[in-house]
Amino acid sequence: MYQDKTLVCKECGSEFVFSAGEQEFYAERGFQNEPQRCKACRDKRKNAAKSTTARQFFTAVCAACGGEAKVPFEPKSDRPVYCSECFAKMKASEE
């Protein structure tokens, strides 16, 4: 039913194959548009989006051991912050 198609990437201009298997996959998922970028350009766009949304980490002092704790939230003075080791020990003792 499906046959391989050669498409041209709108980003880099190179030709790439839209295989019969990929076409079937697209149809099963209800996608109506063919891909417009080659795999390399799709991956490059995907990775660029990931790097712009990288998490920001904050440094705090662990309330249990006094060591350095890196956390993905801004610590507030009214709540204790624990390093990953102390946090894991607390979780283990709760179970």
Image (cartoon, rainbow, N blue to C red):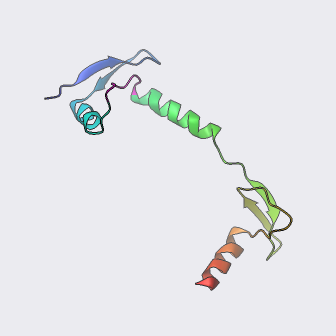
Query: What's the magenta bit mostly, secondary-structure-wise?
Result: loop
- The quadrant of the picture occupied by the N terminus is top left
Can residue 55 be found in the magenta stretch? no
Q: Is residue 47 above or below residue 76?
A: above
Residue 47 horizontal side relative to residue 36, left or right:
right
Q: Position of residue 94 (x, y in %)?
A: 62, 83
Q: Is residue 30 above or below residue 4?
A: below
Q: What range is drawn magenta here? A: 32-38
Q: Is residue 92 above or below residue 20?
A: below
- The quadrant of the picture occupied by the C terminus is bottom right
Front one among 81 and 78: 78
User: For the image shown, how many numbered marks are present on the structure?
Assistant: 0
User: What's the residue at 21%, 30% (across, down)?
Assistant: 20
Quarter holding residue 79: bottom right
Quarter holding residue 30: top left
Can residue 37 be found in the magenta stretch? yes
Residue 3 horizontal side relative to residue 32, left or right:
left
User: What's the residue at 46%, 17% (across, down)?
Assistant: 12
Residue 69 horizontal side relative to residue 10, left or right:
right
Residue found at the very far left of the displayed protein: 1
Residue found at the very far right of the displayed protein: 77
Q: Position of residue 50 (x, y in %)?
A: 57, 40
User: What's the residue at 85%, 68% (across, down)?
Assistant: 78
Front one among 75 and 92: 75
Q: Is residue 45 above or below residue 72?
A: above
Q: Position of residue 33 (x, y in %)?
A: 34, 25
User: What's the residue at 51%, 31% (across, down)?
Assistant: 44
